[in-house]
């Protein structure tokens, strides 16, 4: 599955320390997403253990790929998702690492299709009802979206600084 690779890529980017602003937002968003994921993963596992019939088909992860693309859709973050607080970059990275490990643990607890036994509506980008595999993928794609944004900002800042330096040397 793509989730472990995305977690690793996002984690590497967050280690550099220049991304604390976005990293705080990512971990705050993860906090709220994980509340839903934990709750409904437990329900899905109980339904599986009770012998409930699983809906036919597989989780469509491709429908969530735009979540990972910065600028792919318009979304205004709700006020409760605004970053606040003064966590250090080390604290944010440690929290993110714990969150990603929990995601991987939840994924491992659903190795036999259990994640398909619970669906919860997601309003972002009109995603509709998502199963637990899709919720975990959404979480990873959201973080990837901001990693892309960080990379773009770094490139823009680098180009701006190069142009400013060149202008200074030409005067």
Image (cartoon, helix red, strand yellow):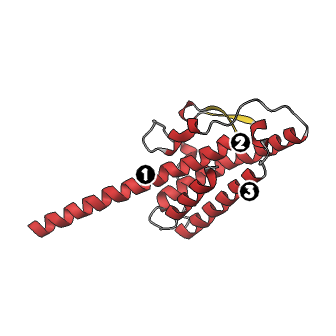
Query: Residue 162's image quarter?
Result: bottom left
- Camera-nearest label, 1 or 2: 2
User: What residue sits right under mark 1 in the picture?
Assistant: 149
Q: In this view, does 161 lie to the left or right of 37?
A: left
| Mark 3 closeness class: few <14, some 14–19, many ≥20 residues within 10 Å | few
Query: Can you see residue 103?
Result: yes
User: What residue sits right under mark 3 in the picture?
Assistant: 105
Nearer the observer, 122 or 133? 133
Labels 3 and 2: the sequence-earlier one = 3
Q: What element carries label 1?
A: helix
Labels 3 and 1: the sequence-earlier one = 3
User: What residue sits right under mark 2 in the picture?
Assistant: 132
Disc 3 from disc 2: Cα separation: 13 Å
Is residue 18 placed above or below 62 in the rendered structure?
below
Tell me where residue 79 appears, x and y as whole percent.
54, 43
Q: Is residue 64 left or right of residue 159?
A: right
At 48% across and 54% down in the image, what residue appears? Answer: 147
């Amino acid at each position: 599955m793509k989730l472990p690779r995305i977690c690793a890529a996002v984690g590497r980017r967050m280690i550099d320390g220049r991304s604390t602003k976005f990293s705080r937002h990512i971990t705050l968003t993860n906090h709220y997403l994980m509340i839903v994921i934990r709750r409904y993963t437990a329900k899905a596992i109980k339904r599986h253990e009770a012998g409930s019939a699983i809906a036919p088909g597989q989780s469509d992860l491709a429908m969530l790929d735009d979540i990972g693309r910065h600028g792919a859709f318009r979304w205004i973050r709700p006020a409760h998702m605004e970053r606040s607080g003064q966590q250090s970059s080390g604290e944010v990275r440690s929290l993110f690492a714990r969150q990603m490990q929990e995601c991987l643990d939840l994924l491992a607890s659903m190795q036999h299709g259990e994640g398909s036994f619970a669906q919860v509506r997601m309003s972002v980008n009109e995603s509709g009802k998502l199963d637990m595999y899709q919720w975990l993928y959404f979480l990873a794609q959201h973080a990837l979206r901001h990693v892309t944004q960080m990379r773009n900002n770094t490139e823009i800042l680098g180009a701006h600084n190069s142009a400013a330096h060149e202008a200074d040397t030409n005067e």
